[in-house]
Each structure stands twice: as structure tokens, then as C-alpha cells.
Image (cartoon, rainbow, N blue to C red):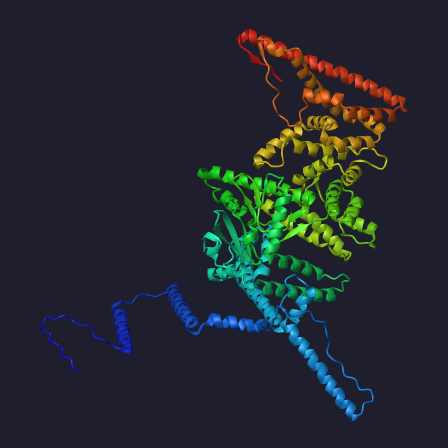
Amino acid sequence: MASVSPSPSRSTIATPVRRSPRAAFAVAELRRLRQRRAIPPVSVGLGHFGEVVRNDVEFLKNKIGIGIRWANEAFRVPEVTKSAEEVFWLRHLEDTASPPLESQSWPQPSYSGLSGVDLFMADVKALEAYAGYFYWLSKMWSRPLPEVYDPQAVSDYFNCRPHVVAYRLLEVFSAFMIAAIRLRTSSDKGTNLESSGQNFGMVMKETMLHLGPTFIKVGQSLSTRPDIIGTETSKALSELHDQIPPFPWPEAAKIIEEELGAPVESFFSQFSQETVAAASFGQVYRGRTLDGSDVAVKVQRPDMRHAVLRDIYILRLGLGVLRKIAKRENDIRVYADELGKGLAGELDFTLEAANASEFREAHSRFSYIRVPKVYQHLTRKRVLTMEWMVGESPTDLLSISSQYHDFESHEKPTLEARRRLLDLVNKGVEATLVQLLDTGILHADPHPGNLRYTTSRQIGFLDFGLVCRMQRKHQLAMLAAIVHIVNGDWACLVEALTDMDVIKPGINTRRFTMDLEYALGEVELKNGIPDIEFTKVLSKIVKVALNYQLRMPPYFTLVLRSLACLEGLAAVGDPNFKTFEAAYPFVVQKLLTENSAATRKILHSAVLNRKKEFRWERVDLFLSKSSTRKRSPLITSSTEETSVDSSSNQTDKDADTVSLVLRLLASKDGVVFRRLLMAANGTSLIRTFISREAHVIRQKLCTTIADTLYQWMVGILRIRSLKFISLPDPPPSSAINITVKDFKILIKDKRVRVILRKILESAKSDRVLMLRFCWTSLVMSLTTTALTCHRFVISVSEGYINYLSLSAPVTLPT
């Protein structure tokens, strides 16, 4: 049907003209050319040219991305990729009900004078043998990966899939080659050391994210050691704790439904589809149960077992090759096996739930440790449901404390965040010592992503996939090793390492002791404590042990990993923090209060020589560190407070030591100390007590007894009833001050009398020594009486003079 166009003179409504796509494209191009002609010519530089090229590249990327998305939807590329992956891994051949098979080797032919018929029958039998071997090989292909790590089963699985291993090796090699090229090209630009370290960390982070969960675990462990890899690199790798890309929600919902057997709505009244945190092995969602409890639901990433065990198998192959090249006698592949056991255990969330429940029960008596509760009815192998814990992560505290460093308006929030961070570090040290030396259940992966600082000032632990259980003999050996390292007793340290199963029978212990002394003898001491990180000491021990081709026990590796994570966090929070200095008071208190044969043996070997005489420099260190812990807890609020306390503590060190000794003599916690005095040589005790070196101790003892007698005189004479004196209670300046009640208990205690009688009887044979002791005791008694009366008279006189001058009650100084 023909259409008639109206004349130009008539006013009509223009109707749109339909054009073909080619005509529309031609019209658009014509308009673009006209616009270009209308633009006046300008001078174009190289910068403008580069910007045009970048815009063209971005345009191409956008159009190519649109094309790829359209192709994925039109040709179902994800489904085809999933099917190809199943074929690549030969998962369609796996059979979970496959029975265990015996290993077979390739058939070997034999020609022992056979006739033609015999040769034919032999060929038939050979074909039968080959058919049987290939049938067994097909059965091996049908066997899935084991649920529990078994090196032989994993090797059998991947021996049938060499193409999988070869592809992974090519992937790892190419990833690190690309990383090396990127680092090489960036280093040619003349960047400074700080930016180069940051660039190296970013490249390594992207490489490990690309290579998957096993390498992410390695990167997380390295990020806790800024002293080894540098601060900038550690900061970049620390993003692996909380910046791992999550997998889509539909896959997570499918895993939850498969594990729990019903849709998500059947178990949770609320469930956020947004990922709260993404880890290397899984990601966490927040939900609310039907009874209204807030929970954290951890869902495992898809196909994790195959990817992790494949990398462990490759690591095991590499260690085997390294063993042959280095010609080592011990099998270093066990390190890969231990790592495989740990990572395979982390893949089973039911084991993690059992670890969390055991850890929570073992540390329930420690108020500063917080462990979330496990919901067992909502936990399966790939789904873990635990109580939701509210708290700040160390990474958040660190960023807050350093974010406003240059602004006075934010000085208070910065100091508060730093105080909370240091409180978290100190409590983490004490919690680790409790796990290591007391409960024996050690959290083996305490990186910043697995720690929280709660509003109630508790340290919260998360992620119990990797837990180390220590035997009692290993705990005692570790306790002894710390004491012997501080004292420099290398022979005793070798005995402790033998008890820790580090040194095996047949090793030349004398030569090992010499090498150990050479490695650790250069450690400097600060106030009697090694000025070095604990992990560096353990690393030196490991290095010496490896020179003797010794294999570290499995728990030792986990302990080293746990302490490395903690010390890395402490180094970030406080560069001057030393684990030995923070831990030794706990060790001393445990030795002085735990009444067991093993701990008494350690204590005696540390402070007594072969003649049962005290090593007074070690006794002084023990008592000073114990008094430090009793005076103020290990937890401090800030470095400024710590420095002030340390200066005052140094001044009152001797007084606190004397007060501690007097208290321990009659207290329930003094059983070990009383046993130590009974086992010591009494003659040496008296000789040391009356020596010139003990003059300060005798003076402090007189002062302490005089203070107690002064309080007694004030009470017995009823000075409080005088109208011109107002005497307050003694101020609690120290947690270990001796009161009148303590002094009365000490005098009446029969155990103290027995100890004194034993010491005096052992020194009866030396009459000169006894005479000197009696004279010293008389002088101390007169000095104490004089000090008491002097203080009493001065105090009463001052109070009366002030009353006369002010006509008001005054406070009697104490």
C-alpha cells in the first residue's frame, strides 16, 4: 500500500520513518562526522593520544564483557564447564561404596622352554593378567578421595590422574612466573624500599588468591611475621584474613540444604544472604535460630577436598625429590603429611565443632577467655553453626590506633584503641601460656582473623579447625625448657628436649649441647630474661636439630605456628614487646604453686646445685618475677602505665621479695617453697643470710617486721580512740603487704617452726657460724624494735602537734 507524503506547506504531525539497521548506523555515522567537522582543530599531544587509547581499550573491554556474558547465558558455559571439570577429575568414575583393593604391579613375562601351545596358553594367561591389571586400575579410578587423610590413599588417587597434577604444576609455575615478571618490571622504575615491599606484598597476595585455599593458608601464616617478611609485605598479606572473595549465595544455600536435609527457612527464622566474612576454606553468614538465638553459620567452599589434597600431594612429591637430592636419611615428607592431616581435619566441620566444645570446657574456669557455643543439631561436615560473638578484631584495633596519628582531635580514640590492642596482646600471651602449660589444648591458628576483643574485655577465639593436644610429659618438658633457656643450663635443656621427643636415642648429646650453646649463647639478657622472641629461640633449636637430621614431633610444629602468630600480632601492637619477659612470671608462679613431683624436680634443678645449696642469683630472679606477677597482673592497660609501674617496682623490689617469702611460708600456695627449704642445705642458708651481700635483705626484713609491729601497736593501744588522731586502714599499695593477721599466722604456724628447727640443727656443728647467726638475729631484733618505736612516737607526736595547730582530726601517716 503506497503512502502519500504531505506537501511542505501543510502543517502536519511528522510520523517516524522506519529505517533498517544499516540505514540507522549510516545516519549515526554521518552525524558523528558532521560533529567532528564542526569542531575546530586543536593541537593534540602525546598525553591526549594515550587517553584516547585507554578509552578505546575500556570500550573494547566493556563490549567484550557484554559478549562474554551473553555467550555464557546463550550457550550455558557454566554448566558445560562444570561437566568438563567432572570429566577432567574423572569424578563420574568414583564410587563411594568401592571396597579396598590390594596393590598390583605390571605383569612380567617368562619364557622357560615353552612349546608353541604353551606359548599360546602363556599369551592367553598374560592377556588375562593384563586384563586383570587394567580392571584393577579401573577400580582404582572409581575410588574417591578419603575423608581422613591417608598418604597412600591420596597417592593412589592422584597417580591415576597425572593430568590433574601436571595441570596444577603448570598453573603454579605460570602464576609465580607472572608474579616474578611483574615484580621485575616494577623494580625497574626506581621505587623506594617501602613501596617495593608493599608492591611485593600486593603481588604475592594476588598470586595466592589466584592459586587457591592452600596458598592462602600459607600467606595467612606469613602475614603474622612482619619481623621476617617486612612490615609492608605483612600488611599486604594480612588482607588475606578478611578480604577473600566469597562464592555466590545460591551455592552456599545448596550446600546448607544438602547437609541439613531441608531448606534454610526450616532451621532459621532470619538468615542474611550477605557474607559476613570469607575465609580460605569457607565463608560465614549471620542468622537467627527459631528460638531467637543469633548464630554464625560457616559454609564450606565447593570442591575443597580435591583442591587441598591435590596441593598436599604435590608438596609431598616435592619433599621426596628434595630428600633424594639432599641425601637425607629421615623422611621429610612427614611434614607434608602433618600439614595434610591438619588441613583435612579443618575440612570436616564436625571435628571443628568437637574441638570448639572441648576447648570451651577446658578453659571455662578462665574468665578472660571467651569461646562461642556450638549448636550441634545445626552442624554437619560442611556446615558449622556457632554462637554469634560481638567484638573487635586486632586488625580493626590496629587501623584505629594508627589512623589518626597526626590529629590531636582524635588523640583519645587512638589511645583507647591502642590500650585495647595491648590488653588483647597481653591476654593472648597469658591465654597461650595457659593452653601450653596448663590445659594442654592449644589453638594452633591464632591469626588476627580468629581473635576478638569483646566489650567485656575478654579475648575471644574463633576457628577451631586446627587444635594441638599436648601430652603431660611434653607440657612439663616445655616448662623446663623455658626455665633452662633463661638460666643458660644447656645440658638440662638437652634433657628437656629429649623428653619433648625432639632428640632421639643414639644422638651424641655432648656435641649437641655444644652446638646448642653456640646457637643460643649469644642471646642477650635484660633483667635476667632473654631479650629475644620465643619463636626465634625455638627456630634456633629446630635448626640445630635439623643439622643432626632429627625430625620435629608433630605438636612442636603446631606450637611454633601458634607462637609465631601470637608474637607477630604482639610485634604489630607493641614493637618492644618480648614474650619471654611477659611469660616468665607465669612460669615462675606455676613452679612455685604447683605441688607435683615433676614441677618440684624442675624447680630444684633450677635453683639448687649438686650440694643442695641455693643459687641465689636464680632464687632472686624467681622471687622478683613472682612478686611482680602477684603485685600486678600480667594484663596492663598501656605502655605508659607499664613503664611507670616498672620504675616503682624496681625501687620496691627487695621489699616485695621479702613480703612474698614471708607470705609463702605460711600460705596454702607455699607448699612447694617449704619443701624447697626443707631440701636445701641449712648451713648454706644461714651463711648466706649473715653475709654482707644479704645486708639489704636483712634491712628490708627489719623494715617489714617493723611496719607490722607498728600496726599492731596502733591496734593494741587503741590509738584510734584518741580524739586528736584519725588513723585509716593501711592503704592497699601492694597486693603482697604483710598485715598483722599474716604475721600472727606466720608465728603460730608449726610448719615454719619445723623448717627453722631443721635449718638450725643442720648448722649446729659449726659453732662460729651459730654464734654469728645469734648476734645477727639480736641486732635485727633491736633494729626492728627501734624502728617500730621511732615510727610510733613520731606519728603520735606529729598527730598531736597538728591537732594543737589546726584543732581538727588529722590522719596518722602509715
Between 6 and 771, the one lying in front of the other is: 6
Q: Is residue 218 left or right of residue 543?
A: left
Q: Quadrant of residue 526?
A: top right
The quadrant in which the C terminus is found is top right
> From this viewpoint, which residue is outermost toward the right?
765
Q: Position of residue 86 (x, y in %)?
A: 55, 71
Q: Quadrant of residue 770?
A: top right
Q: Residue at left 65%, top 30%? A: 649
596, above or below 340, in the image: above
Residue 315 can be seen in this image:
yes
> From this viewpoint, which residue is outermost toward the top?
804
Q: Residue at left 83%, top 89%? A: 113
Q: Position of residue 292 (x, y in %)?
A: 47, 47
300, above or below 786, in the image: below
Q: Quadrant of residue 149?
A: bottom right
Between 368 and 353, the one lying in front of the other is: 353
Q: Position of residue 120 (x, y in %)?
A: 75, 90
Residue 528 can be seen in this image:
no
Say how many tags the image has. Answer: 0
> From this viewpoint, which residue is outermost toward the left?
9
The quadrant in which the N terminus is found is bottom left
Between 596 and 17, the one lying in front of the other is: 596
